[in-house]
Amino acid sequence: MAQDDRPQSKVARLIEKYDLGSEVGDRLEADWTGTDGDRMSLRDLADRFNRRILAAAMRDADRPVIDGEAANAYRLLTDDVSGARRTEARQRLERAGVDVEAVERDFVTYQAVRSYLTEYRDAEYEGTSDEQRRENLAETVGRLRSRTTSVIESNLERLRDAGGFSLGEFRLLVSITVLCEDCDEQYGVAELLERGGCDCTE
């Protein structure tokens, strides 16, 4: 595909915006197709790319970045952590000159990575349809769990701040368990998808 004919890509735009270098795109493709060994899922690639964006934003704010700091900050911004810890991480980055809201808007989804690889770079991976469906479901569950956590946390905090509702610092744990009624085994959704199903089907 000629370069001028390539579709718009958020990932490509961000590589240029944050001056990440063309090797980042090459690495994404190699790790997705597995040309250099074990392949990575689109979700893991999106997380790694987002960590690179956050690290670049921290450097652009003239803030020294030590090993692992950007990864930890990204975890606090996106994982299932308490609202207080997330707020503390945001404030720490903002004091250092990082526009956290702008960076979060630049975070990409696994769909954006897939579009970049398959439509912008014309990369191909001959994966099984079952694997793709499992990956899509895992991404959907993760997105719903994150949204559920955010909604419940914010409402609990509002109740507490309004008075008449007693609650100290808290951490919300949201888990989804699948019970196989044929064998009575229980699995977390992520574990079940990674296993490829329940043992009783073997």
Image (cartoon, rainbow, N blue to C red):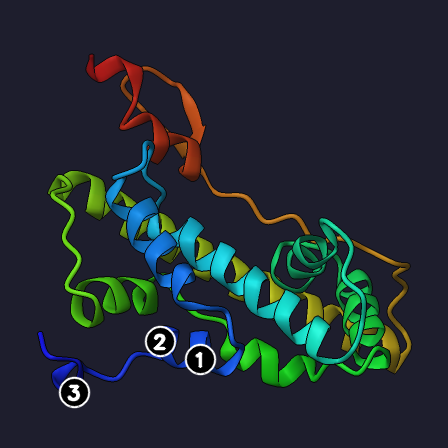
Q: Is residue 87 left or right of residue 70?
A: right
Q: Amino acid at mark 1?
A: Glu
x 80%, y 80%: residue: 94
Q: Which quarter shows the N terminus?
A: bottom left
x 26%, y 14%: residue: 200
Image location (x, y in percent) of residue 45: 41, 53
Residue beneath disc 1: 16
42 over 176 or under it: above or below: below
- The local secondary structure at tag 3 comes to helix
Residue beneath disc 3: 4
Image location (x, y in percent) of residue 134: 26, 43
Q: Earlier in the sequence, mark 2 or mark 3?
A: 3
Q: Nearer the viewer, residue 177 or 72?
A: 72
- Crowdedness of circle 2 by 10 Å Cα count: few (<14), some, many (20+)? some
Q: Is residue 177 left or right of residue 170?
A: left
Residue beneath disc 2: 12
Q: CA distance from mark 1 to mark 2?
A: 7 Å
Q: Earlier in the sequence, mark 3 or mark 1?
A: 3
